[in-house]
Image (cartoon, helix red, strand yellow):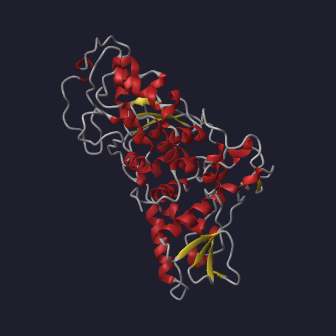
Amino acid sequence: MQNILRGISHMLYQYLTHRDNLHYIEGLHLLFLLQRLVNEAPLLPADGDGTLQAPWRFREAAQWMHCASKLTGVDDQYLVVGGRLLKKDKSRYISDQGPAWYSRVEAATSGNNLNGNANAIFGPPAAPPPPGMSAVPRPPVSPGFWELQSTAPNKAFGGNAPKYREVAENIVEPGRNLPENTENSRAAGLLQLHRPISSWAMATKQPALLRAMRAFLKNESALLLAPKTSSNVANYSRMQTMLPVLTAAMFLAEPSRNLRAFPVNLMLLDMASRGTYTLDQIVWHPYDLRIPGRQPYFDEEVEAVNIQGPVAARRQMAGVRKIEDMHLVGGVMPASPTKGGDLGKLKPSIPKNKGKLPQFAQFDYIHRKEISVLARWCQTMEPGTWRASGAIPQGATAVGWGDVVYQPRKNAHFYDELLRLQSKISSRTRSLDSM
């Protein structure tokens, strides 16, 4: 296992080298381009107002980005992702509150004795919901069913906001939290007993996880455990709890601190779909996963694997020596290290037209990670034209920053290739579809 992990690349790319190996793009200029395109991206209000009575629901990138840009750190706010009711607290952390339909039940009944009667809550079958809105499901009722929905074991991470390391550990070892949910679901009559519980193993499949996250972003149905035609899973949202929390953390909480995180995290999903990274690597470094029953990869020191991170007092890059410092490194996702979102929120002022080259007031390790993701994604999108690199080829010339950040000049080197690259990055700020 250790030898396999040594092959995982967490290096930071700084440049985008052209296929002629004679020209390159500065990674910082790519980041300025991304900032300009984020500034210009359309914004639309989400469905709902973020209250418990009318939680947000999202269908488009413009809605996620609008909500993130307006998110406050004052009050608790609510959203529905993957059929789960999630809470954003005053610190902008995301926690699971249980199935969204149950929150309506709880609010409507205020503790009244239901005697197992679903009609006492939902009434007769409702008319079809409006476009974009989910119908309130009519669940099967069995003894203890309603009580199970509000208990901590039936919520992701016990209803607490998780750390990214915890999320990665659950991605790698879903058996750590899913059996509790499965037992509750079985007791509530939500699983057919003839179906083996091992079907949860599908949750470890990378394509299934990524498809589900994109479905959550669009407020679409996502069944990981069985085909939609199967009667095994009455309602996916009643059992799955971990992935909606991660989706909201990556695409609402992190962009609320740094709006560039929205397209950057979509880029990470694109690359994960192509096998560049796995989802657990995106959110946390594999050397720092703490899974019971596994031999730890390192005891105290990690110096031998040459991991670079911001361990110095002023966040200068240096070799990470101790496992306890890995929280400063995190995963591939720029916001994953401790305080990553807050440190990355610093942004340059981008004029609408070419002028003086924009600058960051304080360039940080998190910005380095953003550049690295951008460069690797550009290589992934244009593999025959651009290559992410950590060093400048000898004798190579930089492409003019104005041609990268703004509309390239007609006589600029690689005019068509630069336009194509800009168009793809712009699309990544506007679309939720896989690229």
Quick check: can you spot residue 334? no
Give residue 66's position: percent from left, percent from top: 46, 50
Q: Residue furthest bottom?
A: 411
Give residue 246's position: percent from left, percent from top: 50, 42
Which corner quadrant of the image does residue 11 belong to?
bottom right
| Above or below, 107 relative to 2 | above
Which corner quadrant of the image does residue 131 belong to?
top left
Give residue 136's position: percent from left, percent from top: 28, 32
For residue 81, side relative to residue 290 (left or right) = left
Which corner quadrant of the image does residue 107 belong to?
top left
Quadrant of the rendering where the C terminus is positioned: bottom left
Q: Residue sitting at 51 percent across and 28 percent down? A: 159
Q: Residue sitting at 56 percent across and 80 percent down? A: 19
Q: Nearer the viewer, residue 102 or 169?
A: 169
For residue 406, side relative to residue 295 (left or right) = left
| Above or below, 167 relative to 20 | above
Q: Nearer the viewer, residue 244 or 109?
A: 244
For residue 311, side relative to residue 377 (left or right) = right
| Above or below, 20 relative to 322 | below
Give residue 259's position: percent from left, percent from top: 54, 54
